[in-house]
Image (tube, grey):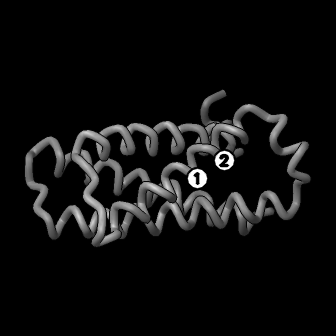
Amino acid sequence: SGRVDVAVMVILVANSAVVIAQSWYDLQNLDTPVSDLAWGYVEFLFSLSYAVLLALELLVVPFDEFWLDPKKRFDCVVTAVLFVAAVFWISPFTDVSPAVMHYLIILRILRLLSLIGTTSRFRTLAR
């Protein structure tokens, strides 16, 4: 539907901006413990939004049909991994190494590219 597409587009644009900003902070060595925690909360919000999108899709599409599609399976696994990682990132009881965070950013970019590929407006632009 139109509203869902608009919501997905807003999430995509915001997530792209955050990935660029987060990568720039990382490349410039501007990260501090406070900024790391702030990025953790931002990551958690995006992970939560992707989890909500996934849950809404699973309300419409039967799970067995959903799981047969490799792209949707990838999105499901990546969404779960990123959500758990975000929970650990903002948890005061755990410490996530910067190396792991680099891999999670790469995973977020792959997830973002996968979601862009399923969005009708971007598919039209790619043709």
Relative image position of residue 100 (x, y in whole percent): 31, 42
- Please, what is the three-letter code of the amino acid marked with disc 2? Cys
Q: Which residue is mark 2?
A: 76
> Looking at the picture, does residue 7 appear above or below residue 122?
below
Identify which residue, 70 or 24, lies in the foreground.
70
Q: Residue visible at 62% across and 44% down?
A: 77
Name the residue furthest front: 93
Residue at image x 49%, y 57%?
84
Q: On the picture, is 4 further left or further right than 80? A: right
Q: Report x, y in % for residue 39.
A: 29, 63
Q: Amino acid at mark 1?
A: Ala
Q: Are marks 2 and 1 in contact (CB under 8 Å)?
A: yes
74 to the left or right of 60? left
Residue 18: x percent and y percent?
34, 56
Give the residue at mark 1: 80
**Furthest residue in direction top, as rendered:** 127
Q: Nearer the viewer, residue 92 or 2?
A: 92
| Observer-nearest of 87 and 26 | 87
Inter-mark Cα distance, 2 to 1:
6 Å
Mark 2: few/some/many CA within 10 Å (<14, 14-19, 20+): some
**Drawn side of residue 8 relative to residue 109, left or right:** right
* Badge 1 element: helix
Residue 12 place in picture, x, y as percent: 52, 54
The quarter of the displayed image where residue 72 is located:
top right
Element type at mark 2: helix
On-image quarter of the C terminus: top right
Quadrant in the picture for the N terminus: bottom right
What residue is at 65 percent from the left and 67 percent from the top?
52
Q: Residue at x 78, y 58 (%)?
A: 57
